Image (tube, helix red, strand yellow):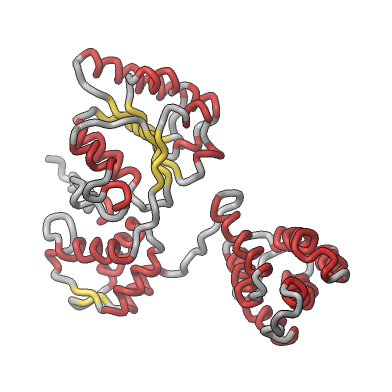
Amino acid sequence: MSLFAQQQYEPLAARMRPQNLDEYVGQQHLVGQGKPLRKMLESGHCHSMILWGPPGTGKTTLAELIARYTQAQVVRLSAVTSGVKDIRAAVDQAEQNQSMGERTLLFVDEVHRFNKSQQDAFLPFVESGLVTFVGATTENPSFELNNALLSRVRVYVLKAIDEDALSALLDRALGNTEKGLGERKLAIADDARSAVIGLSGGDGRRLLTYLELASDFTEGTEISLADIEQAVGEKVASYDKQGDTFYDLISAFHKSVRGSDPDAALYWYARILNGGGDALYVARRLLAIVSEDIGNADPRAMQIAVNAWDRPKVSAPLHRLRFTAPWLQRAMRSMWALSKPCVMPVNILITRCRCICAMRQPNY
């Protein structure tokens, strides 16, 4: 053995990867007892599919389990680093496996990153059954994948892991002496447990990463809330530029205004800013709200929204929203035809806006 040879390091999340469906955490709507996908795998059968869900919900692990239960050879590709040449090499490997009577499972991670022509390269081999195609994506397949490919596969939606499942995963990692942290005999305080589960956001990989970091920081035998806070650091807000999260947030903002809830509207506005969103996009959405939801109920609403849009770009988002705050209040009154009083005076709304916008000041 070389003098410098060391045992290969694996993160806790990699070491704790499930080896069978009983160890698999979450997605009980897919692999729970009696569910069709579980029955299919336990019988050794499989079909081509797309696994769509947030990060850390078990897409790669499920693909590995599918290959294990169907006794197929796995060929792994990442759309980030692979091209048509790699696809051809994978097909050649599948043909060799077929000649020896073996099945091939072609797992493509981040499949949405392949362009249309690269996705088309899979079509004849998926249709002929040469490979069992399993693609993993965090983006909506209806927008990112070819219709021709979607017609040949089944789309399964993976959900964020619920808190009970995350708690069970945490206990398993702390108690497992072979792959987890069991040898250190660590415990975790109740407030620390609640904090790390909440901060994980339904992401099992993130939970195990935070737990491993916190275990490195702790000096005793119990992981405290301070250890979790030190491990997590600054929480990055969930946001993307043109993906599902982007539209979910702006839709929540729109519905909050429509629902006459200024607190919720300011909260979603702050979430968009904190995630790196453009305040001018929110201003454009306000114009749409005026046109579609307010209309002639308040003739002045459009002028106020246009004035907010026309503010110089060098001004802070607070000033633009400050001009729209009175309109937001009138919008709430007009939409409900004065059926209930305004829940908050304008001056309080603007003051609260100042506090929220102080969370993050974008650079313009």
Residue located 21% across and 21% down the image: 102
Percent of width and height locating residue 207: 33, 62
Q: Which image quadrant for residue 325? A: bottom right
Q: How far across and down, in percent of the image, does residue 214 sit? A: 30, 69
Left or right of residue 125, residue 267 in this image: right
From what the image shows, is residue 354 above or below residue 253?
below
Q: Nearer the viewer, residue 141 or 340?
A: 340
Relative to 318, 84 lies left or right? left
Position of 139 with respect to 354 (left or right) is: left
Of 290 and 194, the residue lying toward us: 290
Q: Position of residue 161 (x, y in %)?
A: 35, 58
Position of the N terminus, as image quadrant, is: top left
Q: Give the answer, above or below, for where 333 lies relative to 58.
A: below
Residue in the picture at 25% in, 50% down:
32
Residue found 71% across the figure and 58% down from its top: 281
Q: Is residue 9 visible?
A: no
Q: Tell which of 31 and 86 is nearer to you.
A: 31
Q: Position of residue 171 (x, y in %)?
A: 20, 66
Residue 215 in which image quadrant = bottom left
